[in-house]
Amino acid sequence: MNVKLIQLQKHGDDRGSLIALEDQKNVPFTIRRVYYLFNTKDDVRRGCHAHKNLTQLIIAVRGSCRFLLDDGKEKITLTLDNPAQGLIVESMMWREMYDFSEDCVLLVLADAHYEEEDYLRSYDEFVKNAAK
Ligand code: T46
């Protein structure tokens, strides 16, 4: 399955930590959009869609949440709980996020602007497209 967890270099000293994100350097694409998810209730599932053509880097800059990733053939689950770890999610990957900690802030860097037409929000439609 095409899922990568990348380690981000932490610059730390006795004042605290800092992580820099630079496109085409530690972010493997040109950054066209940045958004963040916060104040998510712990009993909800977010995502529940795939993208036809979008690569994203997702970082839990605070708190934690679980991910279910499904490429139409295989499913995996993982926890994001480390601000120095980035999850790369490519196109045609069904994602669901759940078990958000109260303080969770998910930072997302994307290689394209927001386009509702890029979303596959029906699982059946996603599976049909993934099989092509
Ligand atoms: C993803 C996961 C990790 C915008 O207007 N612009 C944007 O850039 C985005 C991402 C969303 N929106 C609007 C569309 C909806 O009215 O914000 C609302 C919530 O979006 P959505 O329900 O798609 O959010 P999530 O948390 O289910 O999914 C989001 C991203 O959409 C998705 O690409 O991979 O976060």
Image (tube, grey):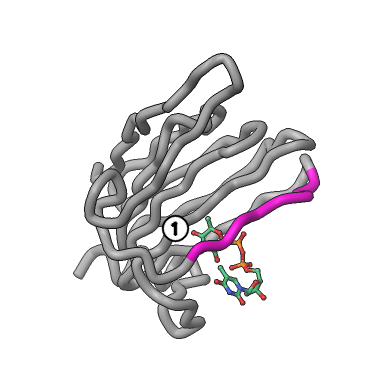
Span highlighted in magenta in the image = 34-41
Name the spot of residue 106 as percent of width and height, x first: 59, 47
At 23% from the left and 55% from the top, the residue drawn is 24
Q: Identity of the amino acid at label 1?
A: Leu
Name the spot of residue 18 as percent of width and height, x first: 50, 33
Q: Element at badge 1?
A: strand
What residue sits right under mark 1 in the picture? 109
Q: Quadrant of residue 14?
A: top right
Q: How many marks?
A: 1
> Relative to the observer, which residue lies in front, 10 or 124?
10
Answer few, some or many: residues within 10 Å of disc 1's Cα (few below 14, many 20 plus, some between 14 and 19): many
Name the spot of residue 119 as percent of width and height, x first: 46, 74
Name the spot of residue 54 as percent of width and height, x first: 34, 67
Q: Is residue 129 above or below residue 21?
A: below
Report the image quarter containing ligand 1. Answer: bottom right
At 31% from the left and 42% from the top, the residue drawn is 74
